[in-house]
Image (spheres, rainbow, N blue to C red):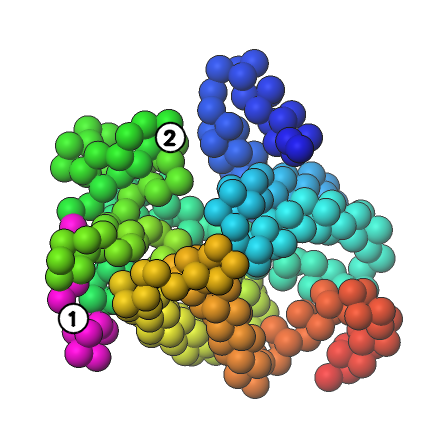
Amino acid sequence: MEDPVARVIAEFSSVFGISDVTIQLLIGSIGLALLGISFHMQNEWYSRYASVFGWPMIGLFFYLYSGYFVEIGDPVLVLMTAGALPSGIAMSYWEWTNDGSSSDTIVWLRGFVVWSMVPYYLVFGIPHLNIAFVQFTAISADVMLEFAGLGGYEIGPMMIERHDKAAIPVSEWDGNMFILTEPLGEGGFYAPMTNSQGEGVVSFILACSALQSMAVFIGAIVALSSVHWKRRARALIIAVPTIHVLNVFRNAGIVWLTDTYPEWSLSGMGIFDFAHSYAAKVASLFAMFLMAIALFDLLPELHRHIMRVLGPLMGDSRGSRGKLDHS
């Protein structure tokens, strides 16, 4: 059954003669601009109204990715993206009805979303940076495999897959390398990796770089505007390199498993899909959870905001807020 929300967006895009991808990026850009204004603006009245309209647009932007994750069978990201739209609407309602008791947490949430999205889409939208991140990710995994004595892999030429077009080498692409002016396909910029027999094993894309995970921590830390910049910088120095190192191990493991056990199957699922969409995803989420706990000691303000956000979900919003306000 077709998603009614995606169908409406598709019909809207056909009316204006532009792609669904472009409409989605436009929705996300407007939502990001509204939340950015609400985070940095001093006027509380204008900030509230900007964010009330911005939250649902951000939620819709991420929700529209859910169809793709359903197609590739990634249950974790399906749940995350499918829940983005109702979460965005809930945030809009919270902004509208807030009596001022959690204003600092709401402001932090605005900044968290803004400064999580800005780094990722800055890299995504500048081909030079996009390619550099993909290449660095592929090389890091290759170096780790060589270090572990599992070498013999080779990184192929950088490729680009554009929306509804066949993939071609970046060297043959005549697009703008400083700003992306056309929608990319599912692969985007990618670096194929082959084994010693010349057989394709995996392809590294921007999503393999753990940039999303880094961006989440960057946004959460940078948005703590009341915290001294030295403490925030210290937290970033801990979080970002740690995420990269863990991701290198993850990528190297997926490459080795995919190449070593090509015939492995579980209920029709190949080793790559199992390792990438299940095992590595669960391990990554657990690692991020442990890292967040470690950062709470350095940034108790971050813990306070997160507990306020989770309070309503835990059925203890008023009690949690009262205790945390005195911490």
Q: What element carries label 1?
A: loop
214 horizontally vs 245: left or right: right
Please state which of residues 60 and 309 is positioned toward the viewer in this rendering: 60
Question: Can residue 222 be seen here?
Answer: no
- Image location of residue 82, percent across then percent down: 64, 47
Pointer 1 or 2: first along the chain: 1
Q: Mark 1 points at which residue?
A: 151
Q: Mark 2 points at which residue?
A: 163
- Image location of residue 236, percent across then percent down: 43, 72
Q: Which residue is drawn at 47% across and 20% down?
A: 18
For the record, the magenta segment spans 143-156
As drawn, 252 above or below 175: below
Please state which amino acid type lies under the numbered disc 1.
Gly
250 horizontally vs 317: left or right: left
Can you tell which of label 1 and label 2 is closer to the viewer? 1
How many numbered tags mark residues here? 2
Q: Which residue is drawn at 45% across and 50% down?
A: 118
Q: Residues within 10 Å of mark 1 (few under 14, many from 20)?
A: some
- Image location of residue 178, percent across then percent down: 26, 38
In the rendered image, residue 149 lying in the magenta stretch gets the answer yes
Position of the C terminus, as image quadrant, is: bottom right
Question: Can residue 74 be seen here?
Answer: yes
In the rendered image, residue 202 lying in the magenta stretch gets the answer no
Q: How crowded is mark 2: few (under 14 residues within 10 Å), some or many (20 or more)?
A: some
Position of the N terminus, as image quadrant, is: top right
